Structure formats: C-alpha cells, structure tokens
Image (spheres, rainbow, N blue to C red):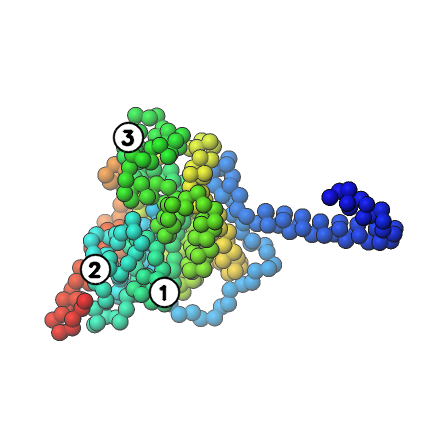
Amino acid sequence: MAKQTKRYLTSMTVTKRKTFLYFTTISLFVVGFYIARLRSSAPKYDTQHGQFVSKTFRNSSVMHGKSKLPCKEITQVVYIKTHKTASSTTNSVVQRFGYNRGLVFALPKDGHIFNERHLFTRQLLQYQRPPSNQSIHFNIIASHLRYNRPELDKVVPNATYITIIRNPIHRFESAFGFNNYASKLKLTKSKNPLEEFMKNPDKYVKRIRGVTRDLLRNGMSFSLGFDHRFDDSDSAINEMIDKLDNELDLVLISDYFEESLVLLKNVLCWKFDDILYISKRIRSENRRYMISKSVADRILKWNKADVKLYEHFNYTFWKKVNIYGADFYKELQEYRTRLQQFQEECVDKNQTKILDGREEAIIRRAKSSIQCRLAFITTAPFHNILKKEAAESYNISTKNGTEHR
C-alpha cells in the first residue's frame, strides 16, 4: 500500500501533490479527532477507587434545559426490581406513592415475588383484573419479577417503565455477602470466600441450582430478561442493551441515589414528599468483603453483561440529568435539605438492630408521623398490607354481584 501511494505521488504534479497531501492530512485529523471523542465519552473504570467514572456533560452547550411547562402526575408505573441495587428502598418509595393515592397494585399470588427464574406472565397475578369498584386496569407493579414487556403492558397499560442498577463490582460483592453465598458454595472455611470463588467461578457455580445460581452471574441483566446462554456473547449483550434503551423510560443509578430520585420525580411529575425515603436492607459488617484490584478485574470479566449494561445507562443517566440544566442541582440541594429533615424526624439515631445476622435495621422514632411509619415499612410487610386491602376490595365487589376471574 505504501509503495503504491509513493508511485502515485511521484506521477503527480507538484501542485496536485500538495493538494492531495493537504486533504489527506485533514481527513486523518478529523477521523482521529472523532475516534478520540468517542473514546472519551465512554465511562471509564477507575481501578484505584473501584468505580466507573461518569461523563456528566454538565458544561456542555449541546444539551438544552428542560421545559418548565406544567406536567401531569404519572400514576401508571412499572418498576423492575433488581437485587442489591437499593431496589428495596426505591420500591418503598413507589409503594408509598401508590398507597397514598389509593392506586391499584398488580400483586403476586404468593408472598412478594412473582417468579424470579422465569419471565413474567399474567398467570402469576393474584387477581387477573382489578376490582371494578376501583379501576378498569392496574396502576402499578413493583414486585420482584423477570422483565417481559409484552405481558407487563397488558397488566399495566400505558405505563412509565423504570428500574435501578449499580456498579457491577459493588453490586456483586454486596449480593455475595448478603445472600450468604459463602455458605451456599461451601466456602466458609476460606479466609476470603469471594476471592476464592473468583479464582474459578465456573467450578464453584456448579454447586448451586435454581434462582440462587441464576442471580450469581449478570444478576441485573438476568432480572431484566437476559438469557444466561449468552453471558459471553457481545452481540447478544448489545442487543439486550439496545432493546432496554428503547423500552425503559428511566434507569436509576444507585451509586447516585439522590440524583436518581430527583430525576425520577421530574420524569414522573411527582413531588419532593413522594421521594423521601428511609434506607432498607442495609448489609451488616460481617457480610462484607475486601476486594483487591485482581478480584475486581475478575468480577468485571465474570459479569460482562452487567458491566456493559451499567456503562451504557450510566452514560445516558448523566445525559438526562444535563437536560434539566442548572435547575437540577438546585432541586437536588432542596431535596437533600428536605430529606435530612425527614430522616431526623423519623429515625432514632441512638438505636439499630441486626436482623437474621445479615441486615442492619434503622429504628423509627417512637413518636413520628404517618408518613414516617409508611416509609419504614419494608417490601414484604407492605405487600401484606396491599394484599389485605385488595382482598377486602374484591370481597366488596363480590358482594355487589360483580364476578372477577
């Protein structure tokens, strides 16, 4: 190629040669600049601090401020829970919003989980239709399930779809400790069970079955409908991300939890009071592991789909934030002030307790408001409240001669 170019230049006149070299140089500069921009725009993983560095675009002149037109509060919501991503805390926010407004929840037949192994279907619902005295359709679904858009659309029509994800390294370490994988994998004698597992994950994962195994690798992607057969397929992972990017309205990032909730408020046209929260399911210290750089690198490789998922939606998250401009950070400051006041009102800072050896629970003040009490209710007990109210509504409908199937 070099010889052909040299012969071609020799045969050219001096003027043509200068013109050719000029445009070639310009072309190479433009291509190089474009490639550099593409590389710089992607989130980078900071191995020293164990986190992805987000591209915030806060000073970009390309993005525009959000319109200040009045908006209508959104009450049709599908919230896809993922594991160890602050999803229970977020779920409490969604549940409290729906409960305060008397909205109708689509609920599972048993407990607070639909089915975490198989994709969601309507057959998993406790009731196929809402009570006729309340609504013609369900308003909210916020229970653990595996994402399946066509079926969910039939249960909560015209919904806004949201989910939450987390830095894959931190999420994996949290899930490994909280779910006591050391015991499940028979690694309790190891000094660092997580490090031991990551030396040969394909070997150890064979020791477990069922959803426990399903959630151990690419757990966020699996909950969002990804098939484990394609854990190592770049094309399948990219296809999943493209699909989710088209179908989900908002992906929260738990590493930036308060920013996420302010963005949620704006997307759903909710109020500050709707997004106040009390943290749920905080992992106790005895379920935490130290992670070296080599272990972090192995976690990233083992969870390739989750890494790409996080990189993509961390990038788009900050683009959404930037759309709101400087006003977003004013709202964030106002929210943090309100949140601090709410938590001081609700939380007894002198007390904590450990639940089942793995969870550190925050204690509510003895005398606190109804909203404080609601904010403290965890996922399963809140489901029991919702199920009790649903049963009463269906019982009323049945007495009035309305049949539900």
Q: Which amino acid does label 2 sit on?
A: Gln
State the image coordinates of residue 82 (x, y, percent, origin top left): 35, 49
The answer to whether the residue labelled 3 contacts the one labelled 1, judged by CB atoms less than 8 Å apart, is: no
Query: Which residue is at 35% across, 32% downward?
Result: 203
What distance separates the C-alpha of mark 3 from that of mark 1? 43 Å
Q: Residue furthest bottom?
A: 401
Instruction: Find residue 186 and name its label.
Output: 3
Task: Please state, as top left, top right, bottom left or bottom right, where the N terminus lies in the image.
Answer: top right
Q: How crowded is mark 1: few (under 14 residues within 10 Å), some or many (20 or more)?
A: many
- Residue 59 appears anywhere in the view: yes
Q: Nearer the viewer, residue 19 or 87?
A: 19
Tell me the element at label 3: loop
The residue labelled by disc 2 is 126
Tell me the element at label 1: loop
When asked about the image quadrant of residue 371, the answer is bottom left
Q: Of label 3 and label 2, which has the lower sequence position?
A: 2
Q: Nearer the viewer, residue 231 or 350?
A: 231
Tell me the element at label 2: loop
Q: What residue type is labelled 1?
A: Ala
Instruction: Find residue 159 and name its label.
Output: 1
What distance separates the C-alpha of mark 3 from that of mark 2? 37 Å
Q: Nearer the viewer, residue 74 or 8?
A: 8
Query: Which residue is at 21% across, 63% downward?
Result: 127
State the image coordinates of residue 145 (x, y, percent, origin top left): 30, 53
Q: Which of marks 3 and 1 is in front?
A: 3
Q: Nearer the viewer, residue 102 or 317?
A: 317
